[in-house]
Structures are given as structure tokens and as C-alpha cells.
Amino acid sequence: EAGVAQSPRYKIIEKRQSVAFWCNPISGHATLYWYQQILGQGPKLLIQFQNNGVVDDSQLPKDRFSAERLKGVDSTLKIQPAKLEDSAVYLCASSLDPIAKNIQYFGAGTRLSVL
Amino acid sequence: AQSVSQHNHHVILSEAASLELGCNYSYGGTVNLFWYVQYPGQHLQLLLKYFSGDPLVKGIKGFEAEFIKSKFSFNLRKPSVQWSDTAEYFCAVNPRNTPLVFGKGTRLSVIA
């Protein structure tokens, strides 16, 4: 079974620029998550989708971050404009059932450096 | 707010030594508990999980964890570590129907 696919693997931008990340979850997984992992910390949930609807975006900085999952499959996360503190690894995860068992499968992540 | 505490930032062990990594959480209700591992250059993967039942759970590669409800703990153990266990280990907790919360992680270095 193919895992969670993310691209790009690395991205370097200057502050105030825009950037987008893409994620394709495991086939059949209805729930998709975006996490931010700052160096030295654990992943922090940014947004959770159930199919194409948002379940939780309470920790998403909505003034600059946006995410969509239009067809309920793949998803994009955008930052516009980027700040230095956005430097982190952005992880995408998916799960089959978000309620009962919530076993999440993670992609390799996109490492973002904002200069 | 719910939090997850991992007591050790970096642990260094010799091969064949025993391992115990601490994890405590602050939520008082029913929770699901997880340990994830990230090997160098690889993605996060599930090591083991606890949902209910026997509080001693066994995972892959000889790892086990014990849920002690009275102590709000879910410590990870392995009797004898190998060099290939070098990785970062994350404890994660979610109460039912709420997002997963991760600890800051413990980096394990196993030396020959």
C-alpha cells in the first residue's frame, strides 16, 4: 500500500514570499491532517479535514495560513506571506477513522526554511 | 490545555542496555495513547498504541509500554536496545474525539 505522499521535500524562501505544500493521503483515508513541527518540538496540529470539510483548524494562523481539500482526496497548505518563525517541517498525515482508533500515518514532510 | 511531557530530551545508551522513556499527560478522562518513532531520514511511524484493556502493550521491534492510569503515565520500555534503535521517540495522547497532542520527543542514541 502506498504511503502518504508529500511534495516538495525541501523549500527555501525569503520572508514575505508565498509557499504551498501538497499532500496525497493513503487511498481510502477520509481524514487528513497537517502538522507543523518546529525543531526540537513535537508535531503540532494545524488543521484536520474529514473528507473535504474542516473538523479542527483552531491552531491554524488564519491570517497567513490556508488549506484546502477540495475533492476530499489530496490537499494543499499555503503560507502567504511567510515569516521567519514559519521555518519548520510540515507533516501531512491521514487516518481511516478519526474517532474510534485514530491511527495516523505520516508522510515524510516538507522542510521549509524562511530566510 | 492538555499537555504531554517527555522527561528526557536526549538519552545515550550502550548496546544491550535497558531503555525506559517517560511520558506523562495532563488529561484526566479516557484517552488513547501512542508512541511514534522517527528513524534518521525517515517519516514518523507508529511504534505502539493503547486504547483499552491490558495496560501493558507490546509494539514492534521488542518495544512495550505500560499505561498507569493513576500516574497519568505511558512509559516506553525495551529490555535490550540495539544500534538500530537510534531514533527520536514521540509520545502522543488524544482524548476521545479530540486532536492528537504530541510530546516534544526524546532523542535516543545507541552506541556500540
Image (spheres, coloured by chain):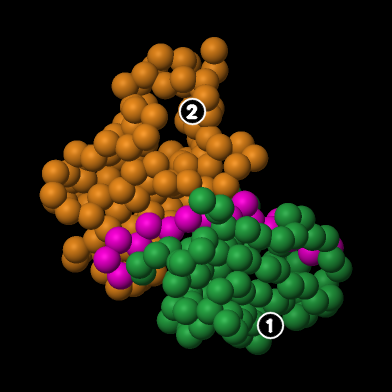
Mark 2: secondary structure = helix
Q: Which residue is mark 1?
A: A64
Instruction: Give the colour chain A carries in the figure.
Output: green
Vertical arrangement, residue B10 with respect to residue B49, above or below: above
Q: Amino acid at mark 1?
A: Arg
Q: Could you say which disc has been placed on residue B85 in the image?
A: 2
Residue A87: x and y, percent?
Answer: 71, 62
Q: Nearer the viewer, residue B17 or A110?
A: A110
Residue A108 appears in the picture as rendered: yes
Residue B21: x and y, percent?
Answer: 36, 36
Q: Amino acid at mark 2?
A: Asp
Instruction: Look at the image and give the residue range highlighted in magenta.
Output: A99-115
**Residue A85, magenta (yes or no):** no
Vertical arrangement, residue A20 with respect to residue A37, above or below: below
Q: Could you tell me which residue is drawn at 68 percent across and 82 percent down?
A: A64
Chain bearing tag 2 is B
A46 sits left or right of B1 in the view = right
